[in-house]
Image (cartoon, grey):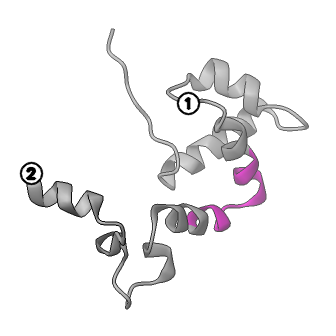
């Protein structure tokens, strides 16, 4: 544990950086997310930005549709685009068992 603590307290934090031979998108989590976001279609970007208002889980049938389906986007479009974001691993599906 002291070794980990020492690394976390290291002001340079050079150990967090990707190798110099790695693509820039591998350098930080932010860079990876920006790279993934830039690859999205305009409609997918809209849905992802609208769904970003949820800080935790949400129901696709209720909350997601009411927030995401606006300005000429139909509920079916929202579900289709949300499914694409799930396939691209930008949204995670969690199943709750009551």
Q: Which circle's residue, 1 or 2, is located before the other in the chain?
A: 2
Secondary element type, mark 2: loop
Q: Position of residue 84 (x, y in %)?
A: 58, 50
Q: Which residue is mark 2?
A: 1
Q: Residue at x 71, y 53 (%)?
A: 45
Secondary element type, mark 1: loop
Q: Overall secondary structure of the magenta stretch?
A: helix
Q: Position of residue 90 (x, y in %)?
A: 52, 50
- The image quadrant that residue 9 belongs to is bottom left
Number of the label disc, if any, that sits on residue 55:
1
Q: Is residue 57 one of those drawn in magenta?
A: no
Q: Nearer the viewer, residue 13 or 25?
A: 13
Q: Residue at x 37, y 91 (%)?
A: 21
Give left or right: position of 67 versus 37: right
Q: Which residues are magenta?
A: 36-46
- The image quadrant that residue 13 belongs to is bottom left
Relative vertical location of residue 88 with respect to residue 96 in this rendering, above or below: below
Determine the residue located farthest toward the top in the rendered image: 98
Q: Residue at x 54, y 61 (%)?
A: 33
Which quadrant of the rendered structure holds the C terminus?
A: top left
Q: Nearer the viewer, residue 94 or 83?
A: 94
Determine the residue located farthest toward the right in the rendered image: 71
């Amino acid at each position: 544990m002291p070794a980990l603590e020492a690394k976390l307290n290291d002001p340079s934090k050079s150990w967090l950086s990707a190798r110099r031979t790695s693509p820039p998108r591998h350098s930080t989590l932010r860079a990876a997310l920006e790279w993934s976001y830039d690859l999205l279609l305009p409609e997918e970007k809209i849905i992802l930005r609208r769904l970003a208002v949820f800080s935790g889980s949400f129901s696709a049938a209720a909350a997601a549709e009411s927030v995401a389906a606006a300005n000429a986007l139909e509920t079916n479009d929202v579900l289709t685009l949300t499914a694409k974001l799930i396939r691209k691993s930008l949204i995670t599906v969690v199943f709750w068992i009551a």
